[in-house]
Image (tube, rainbow, N blue to C red):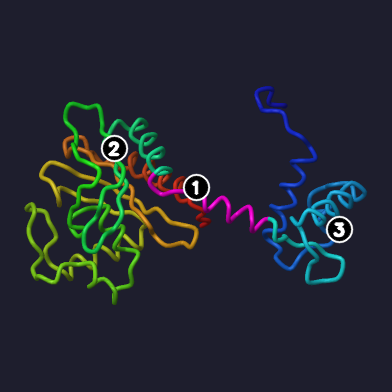
Amino acid sequence: MTDTNAPPMVKSAARVFDVFGLLVHHPDGLSLTEISDALAFPKSSAHGLLNTMVARGYLREGLRDRTYRLGPALFELGSAYIASTDLVSDGWEIVRATARACNETVHLAVLDGSDVLYVAKEESTNTIRMVSAVGKRFPAYATGVGKILLANFAESDLHRHIPSTSPLPTITANTITDVGVLRRAIAEARSRGYAIDIEESTVGLCCVAAPVHDASGQIVAGMSVSVPSMRFTPERQRELLALITQQANKLSTILGYRA
């Protein structure tokens, strides 16, 4: 059945993107026959299309004779795209959309030394909610978003981002103050791809956090949703984890990350 609500497609333009999508997985290149067979293009029209893409620099000669691979013009496009992205400005849009979707307070934070620094936030409209401010700092070891940011570092490098005092300063009764226990919590966050804070930084407040990656694959920020403990039921936790992971992945994609 044809989707009558689908936007109109220009066949020749769609074929250009199909060729790009195919050659991404074949860095050494493919022949005209291999491309036309894989994409079900008539060989005659595929030949003209490929020659045009070569002439414009979007394809180049492959490593085998009479084959095509991605060209340098795509690098220029990709570089221009990366230059146009910005963690904070792009992050604000994702943070707002996430807060609207769950009606809870959402933060975007970066790691600065041993602290997390909140660079974007949108508050819930609920009467009982977390009230915070952009520019506020908090010890990374005591927050969910901090643990997911610390998960970016190898065990041998963690000491640079964890206070040297032992035990760690207590903020609430639930704060992890034992460095060994904290390292295990960070390792767990690294393994499962998210972190949870159960009243470790603020009494009565829980949060779930997910990582934001840049084009190189490094964790450059953490995104979290904060919820009063009375609303942090197991079902709500699962819902928010799915949402924050999806939205953090969306921001990562905007920043050029490909899993």
Q: Which residue is mark 3?
A: 32
x then y, percent, for residue 206: 20, 44
Q: Is 160 in the magenta? A: no
> Which of the two discs, 2 and 1, sits closer to the camera?
1
Q: Which residue is mark 2?
A: 236
Q: Residue at x 30, y 50 (%)?
A: 109
Whether pointer 3 and pointer 1 mark residues with C-beta atoms closer than 8 Å, the reply is no
x then y, percent, for residue 104: 27, 34
Q: Is 87 in the magenta? A: yes
Helix, strand, or loop for circle 3? Answer: helix
The stretch of residues the image draws in magenta is 74-88
Q: Residue at x 87, y 58 (%)?
A: 33
Residue 95, by quadrant, is: top left
Q: Residue furthest top?
A: 4
For the residue marked with disc 3, what is the amino acid?
A: Leu
Query: Which of disc 2 and disc 3 is earlier in sequence?
Result: 3
- The correct choice, above or below, for 13 with respect to 219 in the image is above
x then y, percent, for residue 35: 81, 55
Helix, strand, or loop for circle 2? Answer: helix
Q: Residues within 10 Å of mark 2 (few under 14, many from 20)?
A: few
For the residue marked with disc 2, what is the amino acid?
A: Arg
Residue 2, by quadrant, is: top right
